[in-house]
Image (cartoon, grey):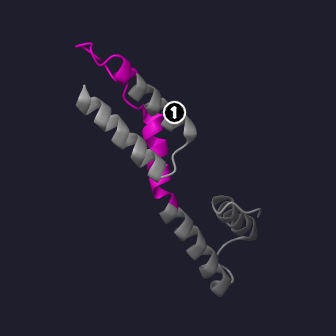
Amino acid sequence: MAKQLLVLEETIAILETVGAGAGLIRKYREQAAFVLEKKNQRALEIERPGEADLANARLIAAAPDLLAACKAAIEWSALDGDGISDPVRQQVIAAIANAEGQAP
């Protein structure tokens, strides 16, 4: 029981560190509260994160690399001139601005 609570606490800390969504973090906090409430029960099953949760966590973890790649693509296209079509370039610029909390 103590190991399950520790794993949940570590998972919450990791999700907070990588900037996971509040809903996902809340889900793990609710499970931690459940473990604390049920600590005297012998059998306890913890819901494992679903495939969508894992995919979201992987995307969050990759976000810094994706942002760096977008910035590099924009810099390269500015040097090359023919590198990225204008609609795609504008989409990448908007994505960078969104990631940095700025208006495009």
- Tell which residue pokes out farthest to the bottom in this image: 79
State the residue in front, 34 or 55.
34
Residue 63: percent from the left, percent from the top?
51, 58
Residue at 35 percent of width and 35 percent of height: 8
For residue 41, side relative to residue 34 (left or right): left
Residue at 49 percent of width and 38 percent of height: 25
For residue 48, side relative to residue 19 (left or right): left
For residue 20, side relative to residue 98 (left or right): left
Residue 96: percent from the left, percent from the top?
65, 65
User: Helix, strand, or loop for circle 1?
Assistant: helix
Residue type at tag 1: Arg
| Figure check: 49 above or below 102 | above
| Figure check: 76 above or below 35 | below
Q: Over which residues does the magenta segment extend?
A: 34-63
Residue 100: percent from the left, percent from the top?
65, 63
Residue 57: percent from the left, percent from the top?
45, 45
| Figure check: 27 above or below 41 | below
Q: Which residue is mark 1?
A: 26
Residue at 71 percent of width and 70 percent of height: 85
Q: For residue 86, which quarter of the picture?
A: bottom right
